[in-house]
Amino acid sequence: MGVNSERCPICDYLMESCQCTFGGSAHPDRSVMKRVVKDHLYLLSEAQLWHVIKLENFWRTSSSDDEYKKCYDLLKQRVAEHPAVIMSENAVLAAVDDNRPFVLEHRRFGIVGNAYTAGPDFFNWFRGWYINHGDDKYGKDWRCWDKEPTDSQREAAKWES
């Protein structure tokens, strides 16, 4: 089933017409469905999973629950303990084939593509971009990270000459 015909698992609208970023009294409360979807991500298609990831990124959920905050802080700490790593060109191409996310950085323009936030369309875009720009310039003009690098990680990583 294509992205254009799949429905949001939370609001049941076609994904391009999803109502989940809207709120207020004119929209129904979908908090229970949201929780059920997040507890059962294994039921979703890849496109629906990417859709929920985009929604989560948009919502930037916070909570007044102290235990939630402690767990969130612990998760951020665990993620920070594992710095982003520059991928080999072969690893990038394998990731594209498997639709595994990564972050694309250009030497002059900085981060220009992020599959974590862009979703499945990123891979088709990257394939076309790689054919036109990628060839022998990996490490010199562009490189990929396994996850979003910090500014200090990007600055510390040397480019090839």
Image: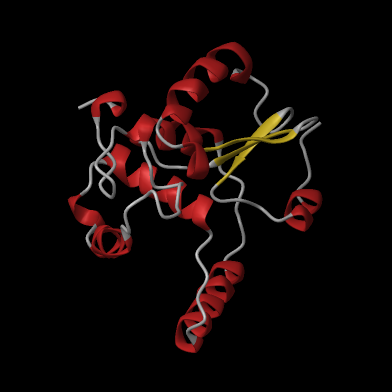
Residue 93 x, y percent position in the rendering: 46, 31
Q: How was the colour assigned to the protein in this rendering? A: secondary structure
**Is residue 114 shown left or right of residue 127?**
right
Give the farthest residue toward the top.
132
In the depicted view, which residue is nearer to us: 10 or 93?
10
The residue shown at (50%, 21%) is 125
Up-down: is 115 above or below 55?
Answer: above
Residue 155 x, y percent position in the rendering: 81, 50
Indicate the quadrant containing the C terminus: top left, top right, bottom left or bottom right: top right
The residue shown at (61%, 68%) is 80
Give the farthest residue toward the bottom.
66
Residue 1 x, y percent position in the rendering: 20, 27
Residue 123 x, y percent position in the rendering: 44, 28
**Is residue 66 shown left or right of residue 155?**
left
**Is residue 88 shown left or right of residue 41?**
right
Up-down: is 142 above or below 52?
Answer: above
